């Protein structure tokens, strides 16, 4: 008979490891002969992987269309401000990382929630009397996407539901469905600069609602909620006792004469997990540095949510240590004129794009106030040869070599999204081509009616 010796080894910061030793007492086990099992290959993808679905990729990948070879491609589809090189990060940001890399002091593992000094730096940067923060209120993550994933994972169980904006960032649904969490879509109102339909929102809450996602400023809308509207949202969450996951990655990326209000600064009792990061404001999305800020002044989350976030963060060993090492300097030494110049470029592009598209019959752009996007409504009745926004944008590619995302990607058909981070001359050329496209296909009320009769 075989006997086993189990020994626990562990020291320092490392978790204990079980060493199992087999002591052979004479009997043998034949390899490959396990009672009751006939060996065979049966490797299958996990249920989680099968439930993981990115609507943007599914729609874009199905758009099998070739651009017009006679026209250079202009892509207004990717929310990456670094693509064209016209929006570089600040030299101070780059120097901070170079110096950390040269120091050789940040090449090892950090605590899974981030270095204490880095958490202190983030807490100090966002701390204010209305929403105080300490280092223990900060969890560093691998980009804002992981911050959202951890926040969802700690707040919701399989079988529960979350409330998600429509139109909204597709990652919320992708992550939730992979975790077995139901998604309920609440409407935003284009005629009110994409404010939330509060009555619709509140009607969706039930006993299985785990959290409300509020994305402000918004991707894909480029909208910014007023202080009074945020207070109305908090009132709904307070009445229904639903915590908020605030996606604030575009926080402070607002145009002149607009004011960004972090939702936690207005909350007196609603607990909030605010997700942010370096990606957009500092123009370094590939550096993968994000964070969760825990706002819980009434101790509703308590230790359970905090401890849960720590445990979930231990699934990977934290975000990039080199960027962590530079984080305090990035936050505190980036000159104010860098932010100002970036926002000036974005606002100028937004104004140019809005003015140009507003003049095109059949299109209804919604003026943005923040972030990097502009949403454009398509009066589909005036483009009767196209079934929907997907067909409209497909033909825009094939005829004009201009790529915009159909808003079906964001659960909001008959709109398309324009990214405004491209150089000014590209914005103007793209708008000119969109105008040419629309003039070719636009049908007035009578023309559209005749075409319908011919079908």
Image (cartoon, grey):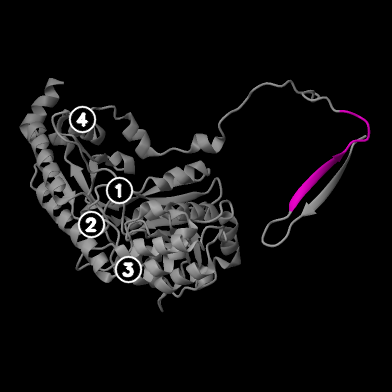
Q: Which residue is mark 2?
A: 192
Q: Earlier in the sequence, mark 1 or mark 4?
A: 4
Q: Is residue 428 left or right of residue 320?
A: left
Q: Secondary structure at mark 2?
A: helix
Q: Find out whether residue 62 is within the magenta segment.
A: no
Closer to us: 328 or 428:
328
Return the x and y of residue 51 as percentages of the image width and height: 50, 37
* Residue 328 as seen in the image, left or right of residue 409: right
Circle on res. 334:
3
How far separated are the C-alphas under marks 3 and 2? 35 Å
Earlier-in-chain disc, 1 versus 2: 1
Q: Decide: few, some or many residues near mark 3? Use Cα within 10 Å; few <14, some 14-19, many ≥20.
A: some
Q: Are marks 2 and 4 in contact (CB under 8 Å)?
A: no
Q: Quadrant of residue 279?
A: bottom left
Whole-number angstrom distance, CA of label 1 to CA of label 2: 24 Å
The picture places residue 42, in percent across and down from the top left corner, at 63, 24
Taking depth in this image into account, of 82 and 191 the one nearest to the observer is: 82
Q: Nearer the viewer, residue 341 or 391?
A: 341
Find the distance from the CA under tag 4 to the CA under tag 3: 40 Å
Marker disc for residue 67: 4
- Residue labelled with disc 1: 79
For the C terminus, give its image quadrant. top left
**Inter-mark Cα distance, 3 to 1:** 23 Å
Residue 273 seen from this side: no
Q: Which residue is at 55% across, 31% downward?
A: 45
Mark positioned earlier in the residue sequence (3 or 1) = 1
Residue at x 33%, y 63% (from the top left corner)? 251
């Amino acid at each position: 008979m075989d006997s086993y010796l189990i020994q626990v080894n562990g020291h320092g910061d490392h978790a204990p490891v079980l060493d199992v030793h087999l002591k052979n007492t004479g009997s043998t086990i034949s390899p490959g002969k396990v009672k009751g099992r006939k060996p065979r290959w049966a490797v299958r993808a996990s249920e989680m992987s099968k439930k993981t679905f990115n609507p943007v990729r599914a729609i874009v990948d199905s758009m099998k269309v070739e651009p017009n070879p006679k026209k250079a491609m202009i892509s207004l589809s990717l929310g990456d401000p670094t693509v064209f090189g016209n929006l570089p990060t600040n030299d101070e940001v780059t120097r901070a990382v170079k110096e950390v890399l040269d120091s050789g002091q940040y090449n090892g593992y950090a605590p899974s929630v981030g270095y204490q000094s880095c958490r202190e730096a983030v807490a100090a940067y966002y701390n204010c009397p209305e929403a105080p923060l300490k280092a223990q209120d900060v969890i560093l993550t691998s980009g804002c996407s992981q911050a959202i994933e951890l926040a969802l994972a700690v707040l919701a169980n399989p079988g529960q539901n979350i409330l998600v904006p429509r139109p909204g960032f597709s990652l919320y649904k992708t992550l939730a469905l992979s975790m077995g969490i139901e998604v309920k879509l609440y409407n935003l109102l284009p005629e009110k600069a994409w404010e939330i339909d509060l009555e619709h929102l509140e009607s969706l809450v039930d006993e299985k609602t785990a959290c409300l996602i509020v994305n402000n400023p918004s991707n894909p809308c480029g909208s910014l909620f007023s202080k009074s509207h945020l207070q109305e949202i908090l009132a709904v969450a307070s009445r229904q006792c639903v915590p908020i996951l605030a996606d604030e990655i575009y926080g402070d990326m607002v145009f002149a004469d607009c004011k960004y209000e972090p939702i936690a600064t207005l909350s007196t009792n609603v607990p909030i997990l605010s997700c942010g990061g370096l990606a957009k404001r500092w123009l370094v999305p590939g550096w993968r540095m994000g964070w969760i800020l825990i706002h819980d002044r009434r101790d509703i989350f308590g230790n359970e949510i905090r401890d849960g976030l720590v445990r979930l963060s231990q699934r990977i060993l934290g975000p990039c240590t080199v960027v962590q090492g530079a984080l305090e300097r990035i936050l505190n030494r980036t000159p104010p004129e860098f932010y100002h110049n970036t926002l000036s470029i974005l606002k100028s592009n937004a104004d140019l794009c809005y003015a140009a598209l507003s003049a095109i019959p059949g299109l209804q752009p919604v003026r943005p106030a923040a972030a990097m996007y502009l949403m454009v409504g398509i009066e589909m009745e005036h483009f009767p040869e196209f079934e929907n926004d997907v067909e409209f944008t497909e033909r825009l590619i094939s005829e004009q070599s201009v790529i915009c995302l159909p808003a079906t990607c964001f659960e909001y058909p008959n709109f398309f999204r324009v990214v405004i981070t491209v150089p000014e001359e590209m914005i103007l050329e793209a708008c000119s081509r969109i105008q040419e496209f629309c003039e070719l296909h636009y049908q007035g009320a009578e023309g559209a009616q005749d075409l319908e009769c011919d079908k």
